[in-house]
Amino acid sequence: MTLILTALYFQFISNKVIYLEIVHFIFILFLLLVALIMFPESSRFNYANEDFSDSKEGLSKVARINGIDNFNQDKFKFDTEK
């Protein structure tokens, strides 16, 4: 499909590749931005950086996705948490 669209672009729109590269660059930036927004830091990363509140929120989301309703992040305490 990409090959066909590229051929149509060069045949009917322009024979300069820079415009196509600009469109691809903008699309890659958009995908990167969406990925950064949709995928938060992992709970393990937050735990290693001693950001326990964010780590608990991440574990709470994982528990909710796994169907565990009785996970209480207020009563949960990490072993290195003060």
Image (cartoon, helix red, strand yellow):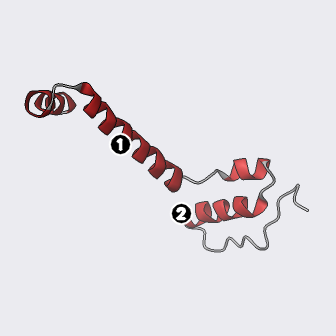
Q: Residue 33: x, y in percent?
A: 47, 49
Element at badge 2?
Answer: helix
Foreground of the two, 24 or 77? 24
Q: From this viewpoint, which residue is outermost toward the left?
A: 12
Mark closest to the chain's N terminus, 1 or 2? 1
Q: Quadrant of the N terminus?
A: top left
Horizontally, residue 61 falls left or right of residue 35, namely right
Q: Residue at x 73, y 70 (%)?
A: 73
Viewer-nearest residue: 17 or 70: 17
Q: Find numbered disc 1 in the image and state the secondary structure of the residue it sits on.
A: helix
Q: Give the vertical position of 76 relative to 48 (above or below).
A: below
Between disc 1 and disc 2, the foreground one is 1
Indicate whether 2 appears above or below 66: above
Quadrant location of residue 9? Answer: top left
Q: Residue at (31%, 31%) from the top-left corner?
A: 21
Nearer to the camera, 59 or 34: 34
Q: Position of residue 56 (x, y in %)?
A: 71, 63
On the rendered image, what quadrant is the C terminus found in?
Answer: bottom right
Counting from the top left corner in percent of width and height, residue 10 is at: 14, 27
- Number of labelled discs? 2
Residue visible at 18% across and 27% down?
3
Judging by the rendered image, the residue that carries numbered circle 1 is 27
The local crowd at label 2, few if under 14, some if 14 to 19, many if 20 or more residues have their Cα within 10 Å, is: few
Q: Nearer the viewer, residue 78 or 9?
A: 9
33 shown above or below 13: below
Kindly identify which numbered label has been placed on residue 65.
2
Relative to 75, is 41 on the left or the right? left
Question: Which residue type carries mark 2?
Answer: Ile
| Picture disc at residue 74 | none
Amino acid under disc 1 = Phe
Dividing the picture into quadrants, the one containing residue 18 is: top left
